[in-house]
């Protein structure tokens, strides 16, 4: 463990003291670089931590995109998601918020995509019982391939246009203005309804063999909860000490991975012994491991994903509006992730310039996802933030190495094909746990709210219940929405069919119009939490948010202090607020020089 001396002769403010304690407890801070072999191992570990949510998104969306049954096409989409996740992570860690945080596919886009695909024009005939199945092209044929590619192109176009909204919100610094109207009572139904609205999809997968699904759930619970503090003996090597013995919390690091592999092995045994039926109509057939193995032979060894690989993106106004709801939920979630990641990795709380840059870069990564065609936008992954807290490694370089690994693996076709062979009930069990956790994360925001207030209970209950009821009615009665304009009909159908938009909009409207104090609404505690983690002079540790290569040139430009995404934006603002002298006066220049000296001292102290 590296020794970091950040203590001063004078007593540090509580925020600084707490942050210094975090730094002493971690192996590598944001700006430190582990040995190259550790970078590779730890980077691959970060990919494994994110892999569950990364590959499960395309599997979940396959029936709605008319992709179900085409195992080769599904494997190509999975590889594309992994590839784009690597590119997005590199962009975010290098030019965005510059914290060690993984970017990958977001569950926030599931309900808008499902709602968009529920429009009569895009409904999949293979899942429509009223359609003539005999007249449809054979699954996996070129005709079938053109069907799901057209649907992906529609999602691509909506994501490309809507991502421009996030880019503007982020790089213009407007995110802070939006947060003034968004509190815990708005966040709770918005995030919780993402998970609650997907219970049917998880149940459909799990019901193909409930015992296997329950086994998967039990294994995830065993590894992530009951055995999370169990340390497994491992061997380690260093030049000074040679080979030595250590221990790692492997069950806490890879609970989903270990549970899926274990359940997968159980399904293999049951398949080989003939315990599972070989009749496609028999209950439990989907738990067999030999029904999709042909994809391992059909998939290419190497396939380089490229922009526009599914065809020219198409754009509809309805799709764009639906994606905007997902982007807003993703932005709110990411702001919280930035603060959590900074705390666990030994970095100072991100200033407004870093947050704005991070949100804007997420818009850029969503634009990249739209160009490549992943079927959804990207966001920060809280799973990997938790892994930083466990491994005590907060190095930015480790995440960048992990991103490079994802780019390489995304080009290996058979690697993506491997995930297609996972039995449906195993995936269903994983969905139940993961969607349940998404719901719980949304509900956890209520810890800031006064739940003894009838006002708050009314807002919470109405927004959650209406957020579930309205989309269900729209799904069954989409033809009842008639405004006289087809585009308006589609926009209303998509928006009212997206549960997170309906619940979030109702909650935001009621929370901002029904009288209530800031303490009662939970806004005071919520804001105090962010302020309490930013005590002390942030200039002594702000170097971690500096832009690479060009920062020294930006510091010479006086105009950059007026640009919200420039690292010296917040510093100049604080310096000017504490002095009535303008930034060009010697006194102000002296303050900036002192700030630079402190930054340099911090870099020297944290260097190994």
Image (cartoon, helix red, strand yellow):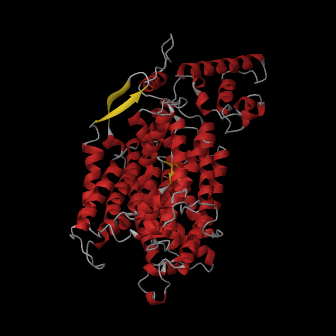
Q: Position of residue 335 (x, y in %)?
A: 53, 43
Q: Tell which of 186 and 237 is nearer to you.
A: 237
- Left of 517 or right of it: where is 571? right
Q: Is residue 470 visible?
A: no
Task: Give above or below for 218 relative to 561.
Answer: below
Q: Tell which of 574 and 554 is nearer to you.
A: 554
Q: Tell which of 370 and 505 is nearer to you.
A: 370
Task: Give above or below for 325 relative to 122.
Answer: above
Q: At 50% across and 84% down in the image, what residue appears?
A: 137
Q: At 65% across and 27% down in the image, what residue appears?
A: 574
The picture quadrant where one finds residue 475 is bottom left
Q: Is residue 422 visible?
A: yes
Quadrant where the N terminus is found in the figure = top left
- Left of 474 or right of it: where is 547? right
- Left of 315 or right of it: where is 123? left
Q: Position of residue 150 (x, y in %)?
A: 58, 74
Q: At 36% across and 42% down in the image, what residue appears?
A: 253
Task: Give above or below for 233 relative to 482.
Answer: above
The picture quadrant where one finds residue 197 is bottom left
Q: Among all residues in the image, which is located at the extreme top?
A: 9
Q: Tell which of 587 and 292 is nearer to you.
A: 292
- Left of 357 or right of it: where is 138? left
Q: Position of residue 53 (x, y in %)?
A: 43, 54
Q: Position of residue 389 (x, y in %)?
A: 41, 35
């Amino acid at each position: 463990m590296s020794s970091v001396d950040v203590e001063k002769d004078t007593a540090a403010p509580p925020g600084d003291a707490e942050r210094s304690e975090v730094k002493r407890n971690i192996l590598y801070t944001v700006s430190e670089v582990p040995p190259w072999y550790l970078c590779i191992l730890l980077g691959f570990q970060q990919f494994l931590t994110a892999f569950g949510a990364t590959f499960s998104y395309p599997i979940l969306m396959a029936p709605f995109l008319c992709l179900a049954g085409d195992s080769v096409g599904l494997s190509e989409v999975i590889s594309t998601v992994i590839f784009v996740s690597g590119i997005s992570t590199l962009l975010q860690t290098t030019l965005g918020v510059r914290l060690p945080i993984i970017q990958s596919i977001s569950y926030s886009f599931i309900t808008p995509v499902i709602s968009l695909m529920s429009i009569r024009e895009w409904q999949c005939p293979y899942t429509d019982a009223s359609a003539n199945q005999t007249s449809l092209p054979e699954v996996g044929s070129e005709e079938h391939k053109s069907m799901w590619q057209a649907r992906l192109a529609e999602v691509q176009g909506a994501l490309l246009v809507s991502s421009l909204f996030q880019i503007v919100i982020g790089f213009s610094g407007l995110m802070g203005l939006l947060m003034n109207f968004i509190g815990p009572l708005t966040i709770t139904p918005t995030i919780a309804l993402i998970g609650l609205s997907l219970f049917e999809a998880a149940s459909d997968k799990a019901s193909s063999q409930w015992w296997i699904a329950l086994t998967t759930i039990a294994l995830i619970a065993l590894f992530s909860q009951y055995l999370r503090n169990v340390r497994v003996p491992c061997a380690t090597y260093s030049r000074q000490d040679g080979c030595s013995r250590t221990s790692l919390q492997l069950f806490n690091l890879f609970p989903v991975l270990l549970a899926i592999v274990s359940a997968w092995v159980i399904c293999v045994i049951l398949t080989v012994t003939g315990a599972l039926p070989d009749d496609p109509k028999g209950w439990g057939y989907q738990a067999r491991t030999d029904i999709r193995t042909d994809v391992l032979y059909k998939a290419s060894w190497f396939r380089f994903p490229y922009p526009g690989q599914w065809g020219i993106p198409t754009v509809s106004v309805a799709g764009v509006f639906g994606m905007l709801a997902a982007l807003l939920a993703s932005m709110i979630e990411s702001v919280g992730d930035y603060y959590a990641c900074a705390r666990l990795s030994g970095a100072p709380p991100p200033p407004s310039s870093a947050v704005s840059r991070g949100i804007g870069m997420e818009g850029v990564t969503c634009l990249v996802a739209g160009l490549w065609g992943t079927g959804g936008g990207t966001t920060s992954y809280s799973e990997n933030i938790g892994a930083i807290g466990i491994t005590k490694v907060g190095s930015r370089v480790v995440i960048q190495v992990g991103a490079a690994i994802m780019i390489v693996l995304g080009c290996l076709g058979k690697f993506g094909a491997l995930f297609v062979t996972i039995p449906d009930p195993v995936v269903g069990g994983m969905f139940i746990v993961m969607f349940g956790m998404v719901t719980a994360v949304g509900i956890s925001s209520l810890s800031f709210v006064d739940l003894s207030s009838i006002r708050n209970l009314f807002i919470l209950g109405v927004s959650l219940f209406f957020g579930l009821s309205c989309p269900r009615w729209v799904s069954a009665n989409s033809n009842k929405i008639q405004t006289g304009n087809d585009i308006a009909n589609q926009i209303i159908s998509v928006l009212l069919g997206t549960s997170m938009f309906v619940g979030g909009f109702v909650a935001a409207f009621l929370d901002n119009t029904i009288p209530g104090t800031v303490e009662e609404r939970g806004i005071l505690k919520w804001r105090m939490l962010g302020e309490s983690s930013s005590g002390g002079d942030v200039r002594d540790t702000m170097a971690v948010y500096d832009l690479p290569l060009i920062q020294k040139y930006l510091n010479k430009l006086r105009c950059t202090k007026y640009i919200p995404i420039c690292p010296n934006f917040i510093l100049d603002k604080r310096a000017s607020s504490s002095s009535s002298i303008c930034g060009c006066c010697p006194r102000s220049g002296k303050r900036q020089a002192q700030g630079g000296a402190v930054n340099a001292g911090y870099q020297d102290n944290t260097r190994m």
